[in-house]
Amino acid sequence: MNWTHCSSLALGAGLVFVLVVGTLGAAAVPFEGDPPESAEVGEELEVEELSMTEPFAVSGGDDWMMQVSTELESPRLQVTAVDGAGNPVFESDVTQNRVLLELNDTSISEVRLAARGDVPEIGGDGPGSYDYENRAAENITVLAVNEVFDGQVRPVENGTFELHRFTPDSREARQAIDNASAAAEEADSDSARERIDEAITFYNSGEFADAIAAANDAEDTANSENESRNTVLLVGGLLAVLVVVGGVAYYLRSRQAPENKLQ
């Protein structure tokens, strides 16, 4: 099984902001960490650790209930609240996909989060679906921080960290479609675009071998049309040069003709 390890940032590292905007969204707080952006399906993933600084900014300084969750399979969640000296005030280490923490101690200055688990399949029994044009549909939430308030779960702004999933075949198919799309636009080829649409349909159905074949065919079509167009332009340019040269030669001969006759 493959392994992706996401370690904690050194002092002075940049802040991570992944926005979740909604009418029920809890207030924004800063997070420090380096969560992964993509991973292969079936890979064992570890995020260690993500730090939530200024946790009481969510509630304006009041006590509040924090829920931490993940969509990783066979998960392990670790949540540690520490005071200003770095001493643990609360610790939780569970093999569940969510954990609750009541923040009711004003000495808490930071909440450290860690997650470990397997990247689930896309579609079928797993969340999401293959969607070339909506890449986010292939994402999962590695970690999410929410506020539980009056029976409602409200996302903390900046507190949802998503990861894009792929398989070797889906990644190859997406790259093939990307390449074909660029070639089709360069050649302005409608026939190539039609084959790309077919490739996307195959991709969204998980038929990656057919998607790759259709995308490669579309790229070949676009390149062929582009070469033909360039050849026509080149021949046209050469003909134009020949016409100009011929016209100049004729003009020069016509100016010299009377003088030759007089001689």
Image (tube, rainbow, N blue to C red):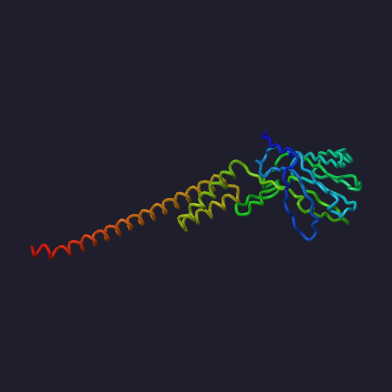
Tell me residue 96's x, y (percent).
Answer: 81, 41
Identify whether 7 is placed above or below 195.
above
Q: Return the x and y of residue 170 as percentages of the image width and height.
A: 59, 45
Looking at the rendered image, the quarter that the N terminus falls into is: top right
Placement of the C terminus among the 4 image quadrants = bottom left
- Percent from the top left, x then y, of residue 64? 88, 51
Whether residue 210 appears in this view of the structure is no
Q: Going by the picture, which residue comes out furthest to the right?
A: 105
Q: Nearer the viewer, residue 227 or 86?
A: 86
* Residue 84 rendering spot, x and y as whole percentages: 86, 42
Residue 119: quadrant of the picture: top right
Looking at the image, the residue that sits furthest to the left is 263
Does the rendering let one see residue 161?
yes
Residue 78's image quarter?
top right
Q: Which residue is drawn at 68% across and 47% down?
A: 124
**In the image, is 71 to the left or to the right of 206?**
right
Q: In screen coordinates, is 100 left or right of 168?
A: right
Q: How many labels does the image show?
A: 0
Residue at point 33% right, 57% down? 237
261 or 215: nearer the eye? 261
Q: Relative to 139, is 50 on the left or the right?
A: right
